[in-house]
Amino acid sequence: MLRVLAVDDEVPALEELAYLLRQDDRIEHVTTAADGVTALQDMVQMIGGGERLDGVFLDIRMPGLDGLDLARLVGGFPSPPRLVFVTAHEECAVQAFELEAVDYLLKPVRAERLSEAVRRLEAAANPVPDPGQDEVIPVELGGRTRFVPQQAVWFAEAKGDYVRLHTVDGSYLVRMSLAALERRWSDAGFIRIHRSTLVSGRHVSELRFEGGRVTLTVGTETLQVSRRHSRQVREQLVRQHRGVIS
């Protein structure tokens, strides 16, 4: 069970956030603060008194001590709580993840999106050891079997009942649905950018916005991101790359 602090200078937004958090069975206790200075004082008192604080849901634009400055101060604590930013300002995402935020939510906050943030907070507060295993996909090539490691795959394209895996060495056709591959590889950093395309976040070097179109560079290829997936793709990539994408 998680103990969290919610911080926002807009009282209606703070009350709504606290209400939604209290409806989540994974949340044990919610404390609120209406400005950065009060939040900092509360955290010092709580942690100094031996009270557990697992996470802080933090607005960015606040008078006086804003959310980013508060996050930098929190980062200096001996055992800092995890941070989830909740803001109306999309442009601060890179700075937020440079501060090792667990998640970045845009207002108005949807209950299902907040639930996902709580899941990530819970996972960060109780990390599971990484087995360090890299899945290998066997590919039949005219009487030979080629073993393609997951980490070598740039992206995968849906081709009817098959998926084409693109790597630096070439592409390989595998009898599998893209949806099944996404379920297997989502925890390894693979991201759906289009209904027919799944990319490896580790191989993405650039995300670009031009004339209403969103594209990304993966390996030596430039791929288009569908409008439906663009926000989620950006959030996931910024989280993975910790400020490489701007």
Image (spheres, helix red, strand yellow):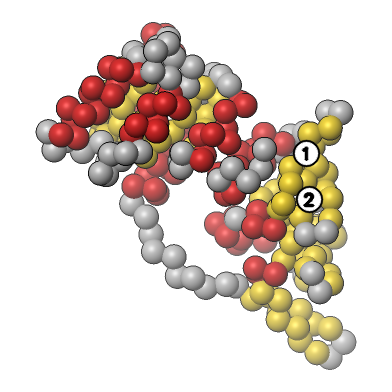
The C terminus sits in image quarter? top right
The N terminus sits in image quarter? top left
Work out which residue is located at the far left of the displayed protein and give it: 49
Are discs 1 and 2 less than 8 Å apart at CB? yes
**Is 7 positioned to the left or the right of 163 in the image?**
left
Residue 179, image x, y percentages:
69, 55
* Residue plotted at (21% across, 29% down): 44
In the figure, 136 relative to 30: above or below? below
Residue 13, image x, y percentages:
44, 13
- Residue 208: image tag: 1
Residue 221, image x, y percentages:
84, 56
Tell me if mark 1 has few (under 14), some (14-19) or many (20+) residues whose alpha carbon lies within 10 angstroms of its own: some
- The answer to whether residue 178 is visible is no
Residue 38 placement: quadrant: top left
Work out which residue is located at the far bottom of the displayed protein and give it: 143
Q: Callout 2: helix, strand or loop? A: strand
In the figure, 208 relative to 130: above or below? above
In the figure, 245 relative to 184: above or below? above
Q: Callout 1: helix, strand or loop? A: strand
Say which residue label 2 marks. Answer: 217
Type of residue at label 2?
Answer: Thr
In the figure, 64 relative to 116: above or below? above
